Amino acid sequence: MNYKIEVLENKIKESLKTLGYELDNVTINPSNRPDLGDYQFNGIMPLAKTYHKNPVEIANELVPLVKEYEEIKEASVAGPGFINLTFSDNFLIDFMNESNKNIEINYNLGINKTIFLDYGGPNVAKVLHVGHLRSGNIGEALKRLCEAVGCKTISDVHLGDWGRPMGMVILEIKTRHPELAYFKEDYSGEEVDFEITNDDLLELYPIATTKAKEDEAIMEEARKINLDLQNKHIGYYSLWKKIAEVSINEVKRIYKDLNVSFDLWEGESNSYDYIDAVFKYLYSQNIVEESEGAQVIDVKKDDDKIEVPPLILVKSNGAASYAATDLAAIWERTRNYPSDEIWYLTDKRQELHFNQVFRASYKSKMVDEKIKLIWNGFGTMNGPDGKPFKTRDGGVMPLSTLLDMVTAECEKRLMDSITENRYETARTIAVAAIKYADLLPFRTTDYNFDIEKFTDLNGKTGTYLLYSTIRMKSLLNKAKEAGVEFNDIIKISTEAERKIILAMLDLRRIIKRSFENCSLNEIAEYLYKITNLYNNFYAENKIIPEENSEVRASWLALSNIIYNNNLYLLNLLGINIPEKM
Ligand code: ARG
């Protein structure tokens, strides 16, 4: 794969070689003194150290060679041995026209791994909250980033659909409706006339779990039901399937609005099918020990800075742990969905859990060292007061309530002229506002929800980005309607254009780093930056009325590239664009 900056870096490497210097990693970067040059080469210092030479001397040898490159208009030595580079217009124009033909050249890094992503992680019968927003949102965007750089992906929602709370919920239903066929001795799996909604489940869940916690007899009963359920007792299993279906439909509805999707809708219950095989394997490796009535695996390492406690495989009450289901999930995935890496997206608080699970996977040799298990934790979205996000009556903030709140705000701000699909438009803008605000901080950073700030049309917001991108589209449509011809960039005539092009040239570096950091924050920042640069250019020039036809065509071509690139970036972040706003 060939790319202009990389080609240039290789040329520098070759020139250094002709001068008798070997430098493995030649990189040039955007200059932090744009008045002196577009890019900078800072690699002379380490080289001078290796060759025991004065860096300025080496720089002076290199500059005349660099000046000969067709890409370079000007090169000069600065400070203690940096080289400032100014690109030729032809180089910049060629690059842009290549992007005009195929925007993907800026994204595809030729990384062809298969990456399995586990994100979303909603729980059956439980409310979908802002934590599930972050996991879904960041996971979806990371999946798209993986694909953009050239990888194949497999995505799994990994529902929390198994375990004792399921027993508690079933018991509560049984207490309320003992007459249901599910609970009869002779039930054999036929359809039962029983309606339960997601709202019913949300009402029921906290009651069921509190009752069990407060009353040992109820807990014991729930435990029994859960055990029967895990052994696929036909009545409980059929009821559980119904509950899971109701929850999954609600999750699908909300994730659809959020543009979050999955290849697999599996969950802990699917992993559970492999639990016996996993236990058998782990015991055969002689790494499971008994500790205070529980079955554990020691996963500490000699160089641990903080203590890593043993992974609990089976709790003292005999139940398989959360860690056990994750080991089973890994067992299943490595067999059924071979991949090079498995990425997990969860709240920062699950760090220890995944650390233990990963260590146990490698220690037991259940997973080959070549397969990378990667946990990507994220920070919390807090309420406007900086404390965990709560509803007015003190409960956890359901994701649907949050979405409705922001949609209402966006609808209020929508122009009166938008009469058709007002709600849908407001919804799309609201989702963009929330998702953009969510992707903007570095993944692990906590942030506060701020409805005013997130929806501000003049701020660093999804709203601003949508508005600006739609304006680019309408400019291009107007030009087409007026029959103005444009195709490629022919010339660069203003400083504002040059700045936009230099930002485009930097895109690949941003993509690469974002992929390495598994974070979207730099891409979100970049989208804002390039949109702003374009808007400055747009404000300074009257594009369609411009009389010089070469200038006008170049400006429109530039607008077309930035528009397409914005579409690509918004889509990468999982953000949809309304028709109008
Ligand atoms: N259901 C979990 C939760 O709500 C998240 C699941 C994350 N994925 C996993 N393989 N453990 O916290």
Image (cartoon, rainbow, N blue to C red):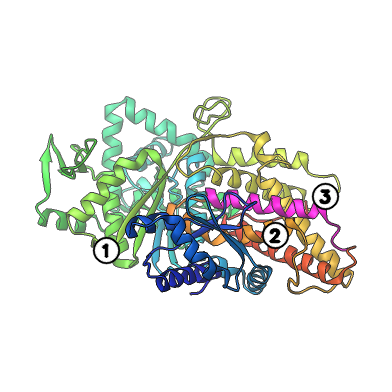
- The kind of secondary structure element at disc 1 is loop
Q: Quadrant of residue 393?
A: top right
- Which tag, 3 or 2, sits closer to the chain's start? 3
Amino acid type at circle 2 is Arg
Measure the C-alpha gap from mark 1 to mark 3.
Answer: 55 Å
Q: Position of residue 256 (x, y in %)?
A: 58, 54
Question: Of label 1 and label 2, which has the lower sequence position?
Answer: 1
> What residue appears at the point 64 percent right and 45 percent down from the top-left corner?
433
Which label was assigned to residue 370? Answer: 1
The residue lying at 9 percent from left, 52 percent from top is: 286
| Residue hosting label 3 | 418
For image coordinates 12% across by 37% down, the residue present is 291
User: Helix, strand, or loop for circle 3?
Assistant: loop
> Magenta segment, which residues?
521-544
Relative depth, front residue between 317 and 196: 317
Please, what secondary structure does the residue beneath circle 2 have?
helix
Q: Residue 498 has which mark?
A: 2
Left or right? Give the position of 535 relative to 397. right
Q: Is residue 526 magenta?
A: yes
Above or below for 498 versus 300: below
User: Mark 3 and mark 2: span between their CA atoms?
Assistant: 36 Å
Q: Amino acid at mark 3?
A: Ile
- Residue sitting at 57 percent across and 68 percent down? 67
Mark nearest the camera among 3 and 2 is: 2
Q: Is residue 303 above or below residue 495?
A: above
Q: Residue 167, position in %: x, y?
A: 33, 41
Label 3 CA crowd tier, 10 Å (few <14, some 14–19, many 20+): few
